[in-house]
């Protein structure tokens, strides 16, 4: 199983503090630094989840932009977020040439486009990616913030509950709508999720996408892929910060659910 991932890379930074007093200069809390951690988000998180599910050598990754999201916590509560978008954008034309060159020399089992709207994709690049996937008969899985119409003809689209495609899909285009704790909707059919104690939903959609793709390639069943996506993404929200779910965690979680 070989998968190509293309998209916007996000650095998720979590900075933890305690807050026990109010600043005398203004009515704001005084934050005392406790520690921090950094995780990959966006297309980087999709890649990382795929790496642990199918193995590193079988995941090819192209990032067209790099952004940073810093989340500031006080006593376990998120108090603000500071974003620096597309501070590491690359030459998109060169990226497109590299992707097409890779596809000509290699034929992955799937292409994943993780478009956070940070600059990796243009309409032309998205259109040509769809064309290449059709010519090579490779399923293209798309998760985008905007511009869904750029990807008309892709195999599957992954909007969240509030996102709309803006067009009516054909029978060859599948819509997998992510519904959070409720599960996901596959071509209009609800696939129920698993009840979880959600601590942080950051990155759950990226985890869902990766798990869905792997399960679909193994079973060729959209329903089985959605069930697995729900399960793995559900496990990820029980952790603070983006969390890659390992096979060991999946095994442990399955044992817990069997014994309930």
Image: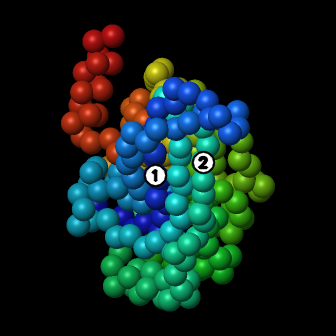
Does the rendering let one see residue 170? no
Asked where in the image residue 136 lies, by quadrant, the reply is: bottom left
Which mark sits nearer the N-terminus, 1 or 2?
1
Does the rendering let one see residue 159? yes
How busy is the neighbourhood of tag 1: few (under 14 within 10 Å), some, or many (20 plus)?
Answer: many
Note whether 7 is above or below 251 in the view shown: below
| SS of the residue under disc 1 | strand
Q: Position of residue 201 (x, y in %)?
A: 52, 37
Q: Position of residue 238 (x, y in %)?
A: 41, 29
Mark 1 touches mark 2? (CB < 8 Å): no
| SS of the residue under disc 2 | strand
Residue at 54% from the left image edge and 55% from the top image edge:
69
- Quadrant, the C terminus: top left
In the rendered structure, the answer to whether residue 107 lies left or right of residue 89 reads: left
Asked where in the image residue 252 lies, by quadrant, the reply is: top left
Please give the residue where the numbered disc 2 appears in the rendered image. Answer: 81
Residue that sits furthest to the right in the current view: 166
Nearest to the observer: residue 38 or residue 148: 38
Residue at 59% from the left image edge and 63% from the top image edge:
84
- Quadrant, the N terminus: bottom left
Q: Position of residue 82 (x, y in %)?
A: 60, 53
Please give the residue where the numbered disc 1 appears in the rendered image. Answer: 13
């Amino acid at each position: 199983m070989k998968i190509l991932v293309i998209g916007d890379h996000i650095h998720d930074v979590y900075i933890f503090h305690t807050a026990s007093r109010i600043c005398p200069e203004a009515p704001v809390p005084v934050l005392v630094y406790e520690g921090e951690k950094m995780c990959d988000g966006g297309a980087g998180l999709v890649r990382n989840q795929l790496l642990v599910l199918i193995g590193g050598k079988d995941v090819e990754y192209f990032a067209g932009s790099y952004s940073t999201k810093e989340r500031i916590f006080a006593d376990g509560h998120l108090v603000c977020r500071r974003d620096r978008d597309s501070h590491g954008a690359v030459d998109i034309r060169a990226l497109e040439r590299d992707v097409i060159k890779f596809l000509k020399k290699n034929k992955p089992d799937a292409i994943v486009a993780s478009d956070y709207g940070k600059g990796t994709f243009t309409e032309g690049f998205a259109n040509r990616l769809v064309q290449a996937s059709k010519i090579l008969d490779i399923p293209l899985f798309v998760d985008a913030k905007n511009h869904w119409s750029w990807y008309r003809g892709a195999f599957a689209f992954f909007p969240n509950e509030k996102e709309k495609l803006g067009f009516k899909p054909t029978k060859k285009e599948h819509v997998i709508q992510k519904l959070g704790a409720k599960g996901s909707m596959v071509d209009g059919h609800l696939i129920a999720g698993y009840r979880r104690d959600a601590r942080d939903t950051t990155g759950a959609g990226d985890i869902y996408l990766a798990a869905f793709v792997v399960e679909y390639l193994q079973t060729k069943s959209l329903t089985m892929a959605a069930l697995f996506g729900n399960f793995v993404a559900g496990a990820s929200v029980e952790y603070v910060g983006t969390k890659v779910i390992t096979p060991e965690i999946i095994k442990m979680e399955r044992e817990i659910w069997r014994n309930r």
